Image (spheres, rainbow, N blue to C red):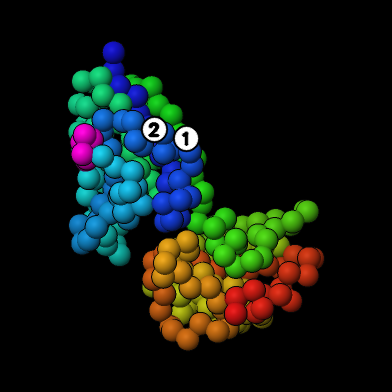
Amino acid sequence: MTGKLYGLGLGPGDPELITLKAHRILTGVPVVAYPAPDTGPSFARQIAAPYLGAHQQEVPIVVPMRVERFPAQEIYDQAAETLSRHLDAGLDVAVLCEGDPFFYGSFMYLFERLSGRYESEIVPGVSSMMAAAAALGRPLAARNDVLSVVPGPLDDEAMRARIDVAGAVAIIKVGRHFARVRALIEAMGLTDCAGYVERVSLAEQRVLPLASVPESVAPYFSMILIYKGGEGWNASLAAATE
């Protein structure tokens, strides 16, 4: 009998936002794997830390954090091989993923390599997009609004086209692209419709109208939410973030 592979969504950062199902699996499996940068601690492990036990074997998956695209295929190939040895030994393995495993999550690349050989289960998590809307105090979308998720690294032309056709927009992976993205939003006349959230659900969380953000740079874990739909939620944006 081989072990079972789990992809556990841990939510945006607050350990209390881990689902009951993810908690049950997390505390019960003998092997816990997680992505870890080569320059610091693993955010996924930090979220799960209150629930990890000394009886569990930990497997960091070290992923270089570079502006240019790193050799991800090789890294995930090696990680899949390492995890397969535990699974072949009959041990269940939980791979931790901040947010949701299948929403821009790194787990999907391990799933692609391992799910054909081993029983697998995905446990969805609270995405940072949902948590950001809750922190902002403004719904993401309603009725027939079209919600678009736009990665910050997109060029201005592509980003403008996607914002133009959407009723609501979540711009993720803002980070080092913040100044350029904010300038584009200003040029489109949407600054008053935009809210800014960084490090959502963590102790150092910041929630501001985009126009009130003084810095020209933003951390990787930051997001801009724009609402262009027919509901009157923008009128309360400033009050909700004071």
Instruction: Write down the residue under mark 1.
Output: 21
Q: Quadrant of residue 137?
A: bottom right
Tag 1's secondary structure? helix
Three-letter amino acid code of the residue under disc 1: Lys
In the displayed structure image, the side of residue 79 where residue 142 appears, left or right? right
**Can residue 190 be seen in the rendering of this structure?**
no
* Vertical order, 24 against 179 (above or below): above
> Which region shows up in magenta?
54-59
**Nearer to the camera, 113 or 23:** 23
Q: Quadrant of residue 101?
A: top left
In the displayed structure image, the side of residue 85 where residue 176 appears, left or right? right
In the rendered picture of this protein, how many numbered marks are placed on residues?
A: 2
* Vertical order, 127 against 80 (above or below): below
**Can residue 93 be seen in the rendering of this structure?**
yes
Three-letter amino acid code of the residue under disc 2: Ile
Q: Position of residue 177 (x, y in %)?
A: 43, 73
Instruction: Write down the residue under mark 2.
Output: 25
